Amino acid sequence: MEKSQCSFSQLPFSSLFSTYIHDFSKVQPYFSANPFSNEEVEDRITRIPKYDNRNEVVNALADYHSQLGVADEQRTILEKFADDESLAIVTGQQLGVAVGPLYTIFKTITTIILARKWEQKLRKPVVPVFWLADEDHDFEEIAQLGIPGNEELVQLKLSQDGKGLPVSEVQIDESITELFSKLRDEFPDTDFSEELFDRLQKFYSIGNTHAQAFAQLISSLFSSYGLMIAGSNHKKLKSLVSRVFKRSVTNVEQIQESLESQSALLEQQYHRQVLIGSTNLFYFDEQGRNKIDREGEDWIIGDQKFTAEELQSKIDSEPERFSPNVFLRPIIQDALLPTIGYVAGPGEIAYYAQMKSYYKHFDMEMPVIFPRISATLLESGIDRIMQKLPFEMCSYNQRIEDLESRYIELNSPADLDTLFNTWITDIQNSSEKPIERIASIDPTLKGMAGKTVSGFENELNKLKGRVFRSLKQQEETQLKRIRKIKAQLFPDGLQERAVNPTYFMNKYGLDIWDQLIEDFSSQELDLSTHHIIKL
C-alpha cells in the first residue's frame, strides 16, 4: 500500500486537536504526558500502580467473555493479561452496527501497534484492549451504516427501537435481515462478498445482543493480534469498581468543581467538549438508563429522592444498576486495567482535556492520551480520475459548490470574473458624467439615472451566471468526476467518520486490516499527520 500525507490543518479538525498534534507544549497543562515523547511516556509508566485485584479482574473478564460469546478466542489473551507484570493500551467505541465508522478500525489498529511497540521497549507484556462502550443508550446514534454513493453518502438505517435500553442489551431482531439485504444491494458482488455476509449474519443473528455481535465481529478481526475485549456492563466487573461509584457520591462537590474549573480554563483558549452535569452517574431500572441528578443534599432518580448515605447503600447492594457517564467511564476503565494510555479520537482528546485534575479525586492519574491513526483510503479508480483534475486530495474537503466554481474558473477560456468586473467598472465610470449632466437638467431624475445603470449591472451579473452555467454543461463529465471523488473521500465530512468498514472489506477482502497493520508496523508509527492510503 502506497501512503502519502495531508496536514491536519487542511482538514476539519478543532484548534485544540491541531495544537495537541503540532504544538503539545501549549496544551501540556491539561494532560499527564506528551504522547510523542518516549521519555515522558516511560516516566508516566513508572507511576502505574500495582494492581492487587488482578485475579479478580481476570475472573470477571472471563465471565464477561463467556457472556459475549468470545471466550474461546479471548482465553490465551486473558492468560497474558493475568501476568502480574502485564500492562494495557486501551481504546474503545460505541457499539455501532458492523463496528460503526471506519475510525473504529483505525483506533483498534493504532492500539495494536502501540502495544507491540511498548511491549518491545519495556520487555514486559502489553495487551491491546478494546473497551466496549456497552452502557450507552443512544441506539439511534449507532443504528445506521454509511456507504459511499456516486454523488453522496448512502445512509442505511436499522428499523429497530432501542426502547431506552443500553445498546449492549438490545436484542437483534428481524430488521437486521432487511438492513444487510439493502447493504448487499449497494455493494458490487466480489470474491469476498459471500464470506463477509456469512460472517455478519453469523454474529448479527436474531436473538444475539448488539454487544455480543459487536464483540464477536471485532474479536474475529483482531484477536489474532492479542486484542482483548473489555467493558463494564457486567455485575462482577461493577462490583470491582463499586468504590469508584461511591467516591463519586462522597466527593461530588470537589469532583464537579474540579471538572468545571478545568473546563472553564480550557474554554478560554479552545472549547469544552462535554457539558458538566450535577453528577456523573446513571441508574438502570426497568425503564432503562436514567441520569442521576442532585439538588442540594438530595440525589434524584426519576421521581425518587435519596440521601448520599442511601445511595451508597444501593451501590453496595446493587452495583450493577449504576453506570458511568463520559467522565466516569475512563476512571472505571483505569480502575480495572493497568493502563499505559488510551487511544483517542479528536473529540475524546478534547474531553480528556477537561479531566486531568479530576483523576486525583479517585487517587489516580490520567494515562497517556495517544491520538489514533487518521486516514483516508484511496481506491485506484478514484486515484485515476483525480489525476485528470487540478485538485489535491485534501482540497475535496471544500463544499462541492466551491469545488465546481473553482474548476470552472481554472478551465474557462477567459477570466470571466475579470471580464465582467471590468465591464461593470467601465459602465460605472462612463456613466458618471451623463448622470451629472441629467441631474443638472432635472435633479429629480438623478435617482432614475442611477437605477438605470444599476439595472445594466444586474443584467450583466445575470449574463455572467448564464455563461457559468453554459460552461458547467460543457464540463459536466469533469464535474461528475469531482462529485464522485467528493462522495468517496469526504462523503459527509471525513471518510473515516462516515463510511462503514464493510464497504472496503467487500471490495478488498476481510484481511485488508491485516495489510494495514503490516504496512503501518513496517516503520515508526506517525500519528502527527493524516494518511492517504492508496489501495
Image (cartoon, helix red, strand yellow):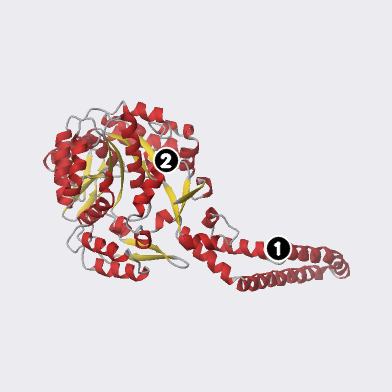
In this rendering, does residue 117 appear at all?
yes
- Residue at 20% from the left image edge and 30% from the top image edge: 84
Q: Which corner quadrant of the image does residue 236 belong to?
A: top left
User: Which percent across, then down, holds residue 32?
Assistant: 37, 31
Residues at circles 2 and 1 in contact by the CB criterion of under 8 Å: no
**Residue 490 shows in this picture:** no
At a point 24% along the width and 36% down the height, the residue shown is: 337
Residue 213 x %, y %:
23, 56
In this figure, which residue is indicated by the disc labeled 1? 417
In the rendered image, residue 257, in percent from the top left (x then y), is placed at: 34, 34
Q: Amino acid at mark 1?
A: Asp
The numbered disc on residue 525 is 2
Left or right of 197, for residue 186 = right
Q: In the image, which disc is placed on residue 195?
A: none
Mark 2 or 1: the one toward you: 2
> The C terminus lies in which quarter of the figure?
bottom left
The residue type indicated by label 2 comes to: Leu
Residue that lies at the very extreme toward the left in this rendered image: 317
**Quarter-of-image position of residue 204:** bottom left
Residue at (18% x, 59% y) in the render: 208
